[in-house]
Structure formats: structure tokens, C-alpha cells
């Protein structure tokens, strides 16, 4: 069986589901191929919640993307009829001379973002978080967290309601890219012929057939990342936590307050980056003693409201580029192929706008945003 469509989306995780939804909503004939169920429990877009913020440490050039992402998340909420974005604020915390804190302050200054600067005692009094003597807090009220599995499912449901065809538990075994067309053979014996291809394969991106020949070896590193949820100590009153990111000299930790849509009050606290290099198929998904120990040591010193029993854990992945900026754009040697990848542990909050960008690149060949910093071929020798 051969299907002929306008666009094929390969990988329907957080980014792929958004791209599929935006493409289908414009009346294009689209097929999404996903090797797992949706939302997948094996990809990177798992773990109940992710921080969303505009006061961006990574680069102020992300802020316009984030402004659009917020609008699109709110529109998706209205379409899905459920709350997807919880606005609990986000505290960026660390030494004033830390590169990340400088980046946060650069973003809020350049883009005029409302924020409050707090000293260590103000941070503790307001949020119950124990800052260090040299730390400064930058609190952004218009921030919080996304419910990631619900967001991905909402995008997938919108795509199907708009006419997209979803092929789950299906793998691409061959991708043949020709001028103006793409031919993809699937492991169920069928073939999809498409005018455009959107590749959103997450940690599996380097193994997608045919892509390496167009962009060369992608210098991506897959990091093992562990997410932990802690209960509070009995009888310990604490002010309500915001989402937070604490930048220390050699590592960073982030936290998300208990989500009321889940049963027990569990605070999510995780180390940001620092996981071992792995591959998606060799990933050790079991919890190790050291996984808890390093986060527990941080929690014990800085987040007393979460210094209770470990309630659950999940292992996922970051897929990182050398500069930790995304790979988003059309391929120079095959402009009908759009690459979405390398989100380096900070991309999900922008999935809504990345999906819109992918649809614009397919439909119009261009985007309203400057995508230069995300050029897929920028690492080619």
C-alpha cells in the first residue's frame, strides 16, 4: 500500500505532534509516523511537567519565540478544553556573575520583561528556598510549568481532528530523498510518498535513514537524565513553591511544585544536565542510588519543603548540540526536508511555536522568525 501526501512527519513526540497539528489545520494532507504510542513513554517529552519561562538564561533571542509559544499554548488549551499551562512563577537563582544569571538579566532587560530581583533572605521568606549568601534571585511571575504528556496528546488530537493520519508503533526502515519528493518505507510493508518531510525523531535523529547524507554526521550527544518527585517532611509548613532553577558553580538543579492534577503532593526536583552520554536504545531506565543521592543532597540544603520521601522517578533523555541551541530549519541540499531536533534539554516549552514554524517552512518556505542560530548545517566542516 502506498500513500501520497503533502507532508510526512517522522516522530510524533512533543515537537512532531505540534508540527502535525499545525500542518493538518492548514488543510494539508499529512501522515505522522511514530514508533511508540502517543504520548510515548520512551522519548524525551515525558515526566508530567516542564518549566516554561520567558526570562531566558540561554539566549535573549529565544524570547520572541517564547512570547508566541505562550499564545499558542493558550489557544491549544481552549481547543482541548483543559488546563495545560500553570502560571506559578519561576525563580532563577544563582551568583550574580554566573553566565546563566547574566543571561536571564540580559533577556529581561532587552525585552522589558516584568521581574523582581530578590536577595537570599527575600527568597527564603517568600518561597522557602534556601539561597546561598552570594545568590541573587530573579523572579518572573509570568512563568510556570506545562503538563507535557497532556500537551502532546492535545496536539495529536487536534491533528487527527483536522484530518491527519497517525501511524503509531510503526518505524521507518528506509528514507529516500529525491528532488522535490520523499519516499519512506515503513516496517509494516507500506510506503509513504510525500512532497515534504519533517524529521522530529528526538534522540533517534542521527539514525534516521538518509539524513546524514544531507547534513553530514550530526554532533549530537544524548544525555541520560533522571526526574525525581519528593514528598514533604511531615508537619513542615512552607510557602508555596514556584518553579525554580538554581545555578551553582558546576551544576544546576530545577524544581516544579506539586501539580494538583496528580494524586499526592509531590515536588519534582532534578539535576539539569550532567548525565552520562548514552544512546536511546541503550539508555539505562532504572533508578540508581547515586541518581537520588546527588539530588537529595541538593534538596536537603536548599528545598526543605521537598526533603521527604522519594515518591517516584523517571529516566529520560536530553539530545544536545555542541552549542546547546536547536536544530530547526530546511536542509540546504533538500529544502523540502525540515529538521526539528537537538533541543538540548530546554526545548519543550517552545514545542507549540516550533510546530507552527515547521508548518510555515513546509507551506511557505520561510518563517517569521530568524532561524539563523538554529541552522541544521552549522556544524558541518
Image (cartoon, rainbow, N blue to C red):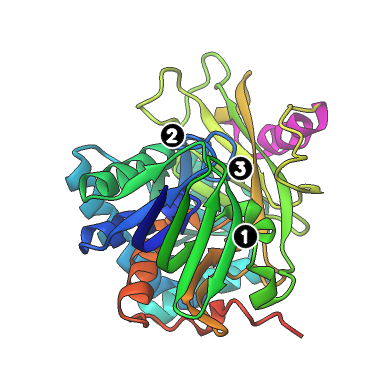
Reply above or below: 108 against 79: below
Reply above or below: 234 against 164: above
Could you say which is closer to the camera, residue 217 or residue 108? Answer: 217
Residue 145, given in percent of the width and then of the height, sits at 41, 46
Tell whether position 303 is magenta: yes
Per the model, the C-alpha gap separating discs 1 and 2 is: 32 Å
- State the image quarter where residue 282 is shown: top right
Q: Which residue is mark 1?
A: 344
Q: Which residue is mark 2?
A: 239
Instruction: Give the secondary structure at mark 1.
Output: loop
Q: Which residue is mark 3?
A: 130
Instruction: Give the secondary structure at mark 3.
Output: loop
* Quarter of the C terminus within the rendering: bottom right
Residue under the point 30% across and 62% down: 23
Contact flag, marks 1 and 2 (Cβ < 8 Å): no
Residue 115, given in percent of the width and then of the height, sits at 39, 64
Q: Is residue 96 visible?
A: no
Magenta residues span: 289-304
Could you say which is closer to the camera, residue 321 or residue 203? Answer: 203
Amino acid at each position: 500500500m502506498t500513500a501520497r501526501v503533502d507532508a510526512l512527519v517522522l516522530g510524533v513526540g512533543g515537537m512532531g505532534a505540534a508540527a502535525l497539528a499545525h500542518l493538518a489545520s492548514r488543510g494539508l494532507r499529512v501522515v505522522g509516523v511514530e514508533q511508540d504510542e502517543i504520548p510515548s513513554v520512551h522519548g524525551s517529552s515525558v515526566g508530567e511537567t516542564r518549566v516554561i519561562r520567558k526570562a531566558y538564561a540561554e539566549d535573549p533571542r529565544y524570547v520572541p519565540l517564547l512570547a508566541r509559544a505562550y499564545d499558542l499554548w493558550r489557544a491549544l488549551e481552549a481547543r482541548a478544553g483543559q488546563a495545560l499551562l500553570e502560571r506559578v512563577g519561576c525563580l532563577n537563582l544563582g551568583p550574580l556573575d554566573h553566565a546563566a544569571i547574566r543571561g536571564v538579566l540580559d533577556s529581561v532587560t532587552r525585552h522589558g520583561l516584568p521581574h523582581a530581583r530578590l536577595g537570599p533572605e527575600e527568597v527564603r521568606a517568600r518561597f522557602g528556598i534556601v539561597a546561598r549568601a552570594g545568590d541573587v534571585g530573579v523572579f518572573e511571575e509570568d512563568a510556570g510549568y506545562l503538563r507535557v504528556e497532556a500537551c502532546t496528546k492535545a496536539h495529536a488530537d487536534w491533528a487527527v481532528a483536522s484530518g491527519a493520519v497517525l501511524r503509531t508503533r510503526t518505524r521507518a526502515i528506509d528514507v529516500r530523498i529525491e528532488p522535490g519528493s520523499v519516499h519512506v518505507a515503513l516496517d509494516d510493508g507500506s510506503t509513504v510518498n510525500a512532497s515534504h518531510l519533517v524529521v522530529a525523531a528526538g534522540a533517534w535523529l542521527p539514525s534516521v535513514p538518509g539524513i546524514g547524507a544531507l547534513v553530514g554526521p550530526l554532533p549530537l550527544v544524548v544525555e541520560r537524565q533522571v526526574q525525581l518527585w519528593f514528598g514533604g517532611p511531615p508537619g513542615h509548613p512552607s510557602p508555596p513553591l514556584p518553579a525554580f532553577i538554581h545555578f551553582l558553580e558546576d551544576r544546576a538543579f530545577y524544581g516544579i511544585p506539586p501539580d494538583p492534577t496528580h494524586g499526592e503532593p509531590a515536588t519534582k526536583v532534578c539535576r539539569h544536565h550532567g548525565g552520562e552520554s548514552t544512546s536511546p536504545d541503550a539508555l539505562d531506565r532504572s533508578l540508581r542510588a547515586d541518581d537520588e543521592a546527588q539530588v537529595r543532597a541538593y534538596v536537603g540544603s536548599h528545598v526543605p519543603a521537598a526533603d521527604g520521601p522519594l515518591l517516584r522517578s523517571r529516566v529520560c533523555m536530553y539530545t544536545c548540540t555542541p552549542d546547546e541551541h536547536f536544530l530547526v530549519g530546511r536542509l540546504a541540499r533538500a529544502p523540502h526536508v525540515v529538521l526539528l531536533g537537538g533541543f538540548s534539554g530546554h526545548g519543550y516549552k517552545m514545542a507549540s511555536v516550533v510546530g507552527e514554524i515547521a508548518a510555515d517552512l513546509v507551506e511557505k518556505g520561510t518563517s517569521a522568525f530568524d532561524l539563523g542560530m538554529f541552522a541544521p548545517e552549522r556544524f558541518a566542516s
